Image (tube, coloured by chain):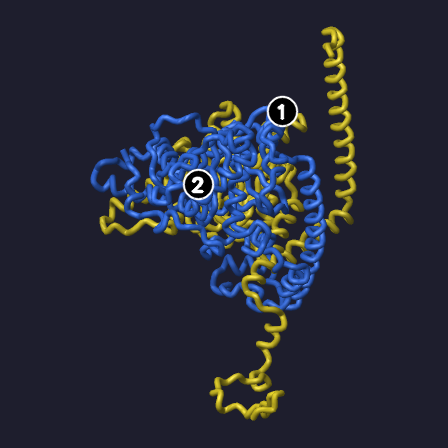
Chain colours: A blue, B yellow
């Protein structure tokens, strides 16, 4: 009933298939990560001395004066209360507590540094234990011993600074295609790749070439499995490398009903646009439909919204992998993470196989009991 | 290798026996240790030290950055009861007590708003007895909280309680009671407690979609629906976009349909393996300390000026070198330029 007419109003990207730009700096994303991951992802900027400086800087902060309860006059109960609870903090006391806080912070910082080193060591050992060696058979062997695997896998990717190893857009594309290879090898049929700025969506041809070459590396050029790349937002599907050799054909839409060989993996590319904005767009569309009496407010039910969002974004993933140092959902579509299991390795900052396989292990051990 | 079935059965039985004895032994040792621990703690000196320490720590942290909205998923009450061999009801009671203790601490730390996942809509699927117990317990706690919020001698004085969720699923008398309690405490503005009673986040979003559609129908002016307006219409109105810290206990790494909208952008999500009734002051304190520590550094990085600059700002301007724009030709002449080839 409700078609995706909001899509036609607003073309998602002005240039859907722009050639890759090597120094493509991500748009100044207005995403503010939670404190911990923002600090840990900062890279070289966050040296130990800098942390120490930051911690001591709170001593000099004048902008946070001790709060005085100024509106105590008049109100009887409040007065009564302030008499009972004593006055607010005095100036000296305030400074004393600030010193104490700096000490607490320093202790915590030291502890956290130790923890960081411990995690790094653990990750190094894991990367020795879990090694795919570019062999799909090994990956399948790792997976076979598990009790269950997720039906749909999602992963949050992010662009690293261009100067870093595996940074920039090329690094992102490489990461994405690696994950695709692991997922195919593990036997999972659906993969959702999320990146905040939608860089993957804008570089689909490059992504497909990258996936193709990486799959060839794993399976050999003769046995590259079939894959479909889907952009739910603009409702496009691309199969394998179809139409990529002829430059003019790029982005040619292929009919879904087309007879094809079995597709081993379906990859959907999501961006921040599919999150809150899509829900708000859906609300707008519903409001318009209600205005012309095609829909009743009482008709808006959980099932309707759910089915619409399933169509617009895709079904709910079972396992969400994040390859950053501390969990940061970055605006992943909120409707879709209802029961999704999260997995991330603390203090890890790379897309590595051990995170993938350990995530699957955690999933195989988890028990979902809705409400019970 | 094939093991004869008799031996196999015996092996299994033996193993089970071993596991059981081990479990019992562990339980006994644990309870003895706990008893000793609590005995030591009950000595007045120790308890004095403990309380003073706690006070100092809370006050110290409260002068730093503090999250505005802290949210709890209180998971693990039943497993707690099971592990202590208590009836399920006791587990829930213990959980309620933990929440109350943590509320005190949050309020003293300066947290503006706490929300807690008390009951999911999916929980109606539980056995009827347990649902009834939970309902009863809830009403009792609600009254207790209302009383405390109005008693100026109580640390919770001046707090507001709001019950959010799909209240059409509750019985009418329950709704009446909730309305009364909300009414009593509506003037509190220091601290807000949101209890998500029959709540799921999807239901929250659905409710907001409906409200938005309804509103746009009513005023035909077509005031555009945008993310901000949408967010403000959610159950936790003002605090809907500000959940800085979400704490989930008992080891599951998922959100279970709680606060999806509030948390998916830039909240810190902490998962803890302890069961909710065991979730202590120190566990929460360390989480908030961690948040606060990283927040300090983040703020510092954003602001990007050091202590020195701060001091320098305070120096009176006469002492500073002034920088005035000047034309190039007003500069003193540079020394004579001479080339090594000797040309003029």
Residue farthest to the left? A292
Residue occupying image coordinates x 52% and y 33%: A221
In the figure, is residue A346 to the left or right of A155? right
| 3D distance between C-alphas at marks 2 and 1 | 30 Å
In the displayed structure, would residue A161 be above or below residue A302? below
Residue occupying image coordinates x 78% and y 44%: B43
Residue occupying image coordinates x 56% and y 93%: B344
Residue occupying image coordinates x 58% and y 52%: A41
User: Looking at the image, which is closer to me, A228 or B147?
Assistant: A228
Q: What residue does disc 2 label?
A: A269
Callout 1: 10 Å neighbours few (<14), some, many (20+)?
Answer: few
Q: What is the secondary structure assignment of the residue under circle 2?
A: strand
- Going from N to C along the chain, the mark reached first, 2 or 1, is 1
Q: How far from the left and from the top, in percent, is residue A49?
A: 68, 62
User: Looking at the image, which is closer to me, A160 or A298?
Assistant: A160
Is any part of residue A371 visible from this angle? no
In the figure, is residue A37 to the left or right of B182? right
User: Looking at the image, which is closer to me, A77 or A72?
Assistant: A72
Residue at mark 2: chain: A
User: Looking at the image, which is closer to me, B42 or A332?
Assistant: A332
Is any part of residue A307 visible from this angle? yes
Q: What residue does disc 1 label?
A: A145
In the displayed structure, would residue A320 be above or below residue A115? above
Callout 2: 10 Å neighbours few (<14), some, many (20+)?
Answer: many
Marks 2 and 1 belong to one chain: yes
In the figure, is residue A77 to the left or right of B64? left
């Amino acid at each position: 009933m409700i078609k995706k007419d909001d899509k036609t109003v607003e073309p998602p990207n002005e240039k859907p298939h722009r050639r890759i730009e090597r120094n493509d700096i991500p748009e100044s994303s207005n995403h503010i990560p939670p404190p911990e991951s923002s600090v840990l992802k900062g890279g070289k900027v966050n040296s130990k001395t800098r942390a120490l400086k930051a911690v001591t800087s709170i001593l000099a902060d004048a902008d946070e004066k001790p709060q005085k309860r100024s509106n105590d006059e008049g109100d009887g109960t409040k007065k009564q209360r302030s008499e009972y609870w004593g006055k607010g903090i005095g100036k000296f006391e305030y400074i004393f507590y600030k010193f104490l806080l700096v000490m607490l912070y320093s202790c915590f910082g030291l502890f956290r540094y130790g923890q960081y080193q411990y995690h790094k060591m653990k990750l190094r050992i894991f990367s020795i234990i879990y090694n795919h060696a570019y062999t799909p058979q090994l990956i399948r062997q790792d997976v076979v011993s598990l009790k269950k695997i997720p039906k749909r896998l999602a992963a949050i990717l992010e662009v690293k600074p261009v100067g870093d190893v595996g940074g920039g857009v090329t690094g992102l594309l490489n990461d994405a295609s690696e994950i695709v290879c692991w997922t195919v090898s593990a036997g999972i049929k659906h993969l959702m790749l999320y990146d905040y700025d939608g860089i993957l969506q804008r570089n689909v041809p490059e992504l497909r070439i990258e996936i193709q070459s990486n799959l060839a590396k794993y399976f050999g050029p003769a046995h590259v499995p079939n894959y479909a790349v889907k952009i739910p937002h603009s409702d496009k599907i691309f199969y394998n490398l179809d139409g990529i050799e002829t430059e003019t054909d790029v982005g040619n839409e292929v009919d879904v009903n087309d007879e094809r060989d079995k597709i081993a993996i379906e990859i959907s590319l999501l961006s921040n646009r599919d999150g809150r904005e899509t829900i708000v767009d859906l609300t707008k569309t519903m409001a318009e439909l209600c205005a012309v009496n095609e829909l009743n407010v009482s008709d808006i039910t959980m099932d309707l919204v759910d089915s619409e969002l399933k169509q617009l974004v895709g079904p709910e993933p079972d396992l969400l992998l994040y390859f950053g140092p501390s969990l940061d959902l970055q605006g992943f579509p909120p409707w879709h993470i209802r029961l999704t299991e999260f997995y991330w390795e603390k203090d890890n900052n790379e897309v590595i196989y051990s995170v993938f396989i350990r995530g699957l292990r955690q999933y195989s051990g988890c028990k979902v009991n809705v409400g019970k | 290798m094939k093991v004869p079935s008799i031996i196999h059965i015996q092996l299994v039985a033996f193993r089970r026996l071993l596991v059981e004895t081990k479990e019992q032994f562990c339980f006994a040792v644990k309870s003895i240790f706990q008893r000793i621990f609590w005995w030591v703690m009950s000595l007045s000196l120790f308890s004095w030290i403990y309380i003073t320490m706690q006070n100092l720590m809370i006050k110290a942290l409260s002068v730093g950055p503090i999250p505005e909205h802290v949210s709890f998923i209180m998971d693990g009450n039943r497993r707690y009861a099971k592990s202590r061999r208590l009836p399920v009801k006791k587990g829930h009671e213990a959980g309620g007590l933990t929440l109350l203790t943590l509320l005190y601490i949050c309020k003293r730390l300066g947290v503006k708003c706490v929300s807690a996942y008390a009951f999911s809509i999916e929980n109606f699927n539980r056995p009827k007895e347990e649902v009834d117990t939970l309902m009863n317990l809830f009403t009792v706690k609600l009254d207790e909280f209302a009383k405390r919020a109005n008693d100026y001698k109580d640390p919770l004085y001046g707090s507001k309680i709001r019950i959010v969720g799909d209240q059409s699923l509750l019985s009418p008398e329950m709704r009446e009671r909730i309305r009364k309690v909300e009414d009593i405490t509506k003037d509190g503005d220091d601290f807000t407690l949101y209890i998500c009673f029959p709540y799921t986040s999807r239901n929250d979003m659905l409710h907001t979609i409906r409200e938005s559609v309804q509103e746009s129908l009513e005023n035909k002016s077509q005031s555009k629906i945008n993310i901000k307006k949408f967010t403000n219409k959610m159950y936790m109105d003002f605090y809907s976009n500000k959940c800085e810290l979400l704490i989930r206990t008992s080891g599951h790494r998922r959100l279970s349909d709680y606060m999806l909208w509030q948390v998916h952008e830039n909240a810190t999500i902490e998962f803890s393996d302890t069961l909710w009734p065991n979730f202590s002051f120190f566990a929460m304190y360390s989480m908030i300390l961690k948040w606060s520590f990283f927040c300090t550094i983040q703020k510092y990085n954003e602001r990007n000026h050091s202590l020195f600059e701060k001091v320098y700002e305070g120096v009176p301007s006469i002492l500073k070198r002034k920088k005035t724009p000047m034309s190039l030709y007003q500069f003193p002449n540079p020394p004579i330029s001479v080339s090594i080839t000797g040309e003029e």
